[in-house]
């Protein structure tokens, strides 16, 4: 185990795990701090997905330290704390307090702060975080329901959230390359700086910063800060040359698609699949609500589809969704379908389905919550942002593809299977 990462939410963890996997590291993502014995013998990087972004700061610190303990025991050589690329936090934390606690536990006196994610328009210049063309404080993040961001200065934000002495590595240094950045780190350390915001406006900058931070025991930032890290381990002879797996050894068994996303991309993928002859059954929220259609009925239908890959979906056009929400209430309609699909996934696993695509972010969260794998091994990417994963740590392993609603090409449900052996 080379790199141990702690992410403050689930989708951010997947994003980071994919970045490391693309860099050629064999990566697994755990759901919370694993309890049982996970076999990490072939693993280069572990990303522990916490749900600590908006917890009270003391709780986030405790969870993060627990994750750190697990990663230290697993033998990680370097640690990464991953937060959101819009630095989602409140004046009380949690980014500052968690970084401070991790630094103390790791006995280090310097770390970097770099949430930049240029591919998604998040850049840092003169220590200010930008979202697209806007300062963070002018962006829609200023109205976020849980973590409104009204200051774009990462230096002020970090100084406000921690007792650390905060400094800046300006873009002028980053543009001169890894040696210049490493020199800036040495200078900062000599001047008593403990947390260094580093400007980054491109992926190349992030690679330079990653290279300069090769000997830092703790690195912090968005998923982009991981771009340069795999190469450090390769340079040190600890990691094989990047080899991108194009297929995935999935457990033998039946396949199934569950869709609870009503996003446009998912609806298009459903139309494409049906046009190609995929057997499909549309769920009616009203029939589920009044007990006319039960998980048993879904199971009988799915298991009757013999050799084909059936698609069970609740996905509907906006006006149908509105009608269901008016009749049932927005939250009840959502959770009713999420529970139905999660229960169906559990029953499908018990019935021998071992290859499953789930469409929808919340839907995937509900299904993963029900299947409760201890960890997911990241496999090849089906489309940008959506890898096949293999569940680890329980008796019946499954290949799972968890697709955020708007991700994936129209033929996603058809082509995903080609990557499985
Ligand atoms: P996405 O990633 O596309 O946003 P999510 O799974 O996160 O998809 O969210 C979709 C939400 O809509 C879920 O809570 C799901 O249960 C709910 N939903 C799905 N189908 C319907 C429907 N026909 N009527 C009302 N709500 C629905």
Image: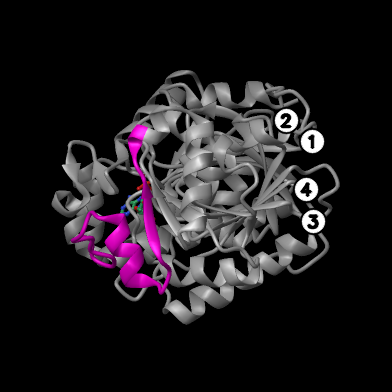
Start and end of the magenta stretch? Answer: 144-172
Disc 3 to disc 1: CB gap under 8 Å: no
The CA distance from mark 3 to mark 4 is 6 Å
Q: Is residue 401 above or below residue 139?
A: above
- The residue singled out by tag 3 in the image is 75
Q: Secondary structure at mark 2?
A: helix
Image mark count: 4
Query: From this viewpoint, which residue is outermost toward the left?
Result: 138
Residue 27 position by quadrant: top right
Identify the residue shown where x is 57% and y is 62%: 369
The CA distance from mark 2 to mark 4 is 13 Å
- The residue singled out by tag 2 in the image is 234
- The residue singled out by tag 1 in the image is 238
The CA distance from mark 3 to mark 2 is 17 Å
Apparent side of residue 27 relative to residue 208 in the rendered image (left or right): right
- Residue 344 place in picture, x, y as percent: 58, 55
The CA distance from mark 3 to mark 1 is 13 Å
The CA distance from mark 1 to mark 2 is 6 Å
Q: Is residue 312 above or below residue 54?
A: above
């Amino acid at each position: 185990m080379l790199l141990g990462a702690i992410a403050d939410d689930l989708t951010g963890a997947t994003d980071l795990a994919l970045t490391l996997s693309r860099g050629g590291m064999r990566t697994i993502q755990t759901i919370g701090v694993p309890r049982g014995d996970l076999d990490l013998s072939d693993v280069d990087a572990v990303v522990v997905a916490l749900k600590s972004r908006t917890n009270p700061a003391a709780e986030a610190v405790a969870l993060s330290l627990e994750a750190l303990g697990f990663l230290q025991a697993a033998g990680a050589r370097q640690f990464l704390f991953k937060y959101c690329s819009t630095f989602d936090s409140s004046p009380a934390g949690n980014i500052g307090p968690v970084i401070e606690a991790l630094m103390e536990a790791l006995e280090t006196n310097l770390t970097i702060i770099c949430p930049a994610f240029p591919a998604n328009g998040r850049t840092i210049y003169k220590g200010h975080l930008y979202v697209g063309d806007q300062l963070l404080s002018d962006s829609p993040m200023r109205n976020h329901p849980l973590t409104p961001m009204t200051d774009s200065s990462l230096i002020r934000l970090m100084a406000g959230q921690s007792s650390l002495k905060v400094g800046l590595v300006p873009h002028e240094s980053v543009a001169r390359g890894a040696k210049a950045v490493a020199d800036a780190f040495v200078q900062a350390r000599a001047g008593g700086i403990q947390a260094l915001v580093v400007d980054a406006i491109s992926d190349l900058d992030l690679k330079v910063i990653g290279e300069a931070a090769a000997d830092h025991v703790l690195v912090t930032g968005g998923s982009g800060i991981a771009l340069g890290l795999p190469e450090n381990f390769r340079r040190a002879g600890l990691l094989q040359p990047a080899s991108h797996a194009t297929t995935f050894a999935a457990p033998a068994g039946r396949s199934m698609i569950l869709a609870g996303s009503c996003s446009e991309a998912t609806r298009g993928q459903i139309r494409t699949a049906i046009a190609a002859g995929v057997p499909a059954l549309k769920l009616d929220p009203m029939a589920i609500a009044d007990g006319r259609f039960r998980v048993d009925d879904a199971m009988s239908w799915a298991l009757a589809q013999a050799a084909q890959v059936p698609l069970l979906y609740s996905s509907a056009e906006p006006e149908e969704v509105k009608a269901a929400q008016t009749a049932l209430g927005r939250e009840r309609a959502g959770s009713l379908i999420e529970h139905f699909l999660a229960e169906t996934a559990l029953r499908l696993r018990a019935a021998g389905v071992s290859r499953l695509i789930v469409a929808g972010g919340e839907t995937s969260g509900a299904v993963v919550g029900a299947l409760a794998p201890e960890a997911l091994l990241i496999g090849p990417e089906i489309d940008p942002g959506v890898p096949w994963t293999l569940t680890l740590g329980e008796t019946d392993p499954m290949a799972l593809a968890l697709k955020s609603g708007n991700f994936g090409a129209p033929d996603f449900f058809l082509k995903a299977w080609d990557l499985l052996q």
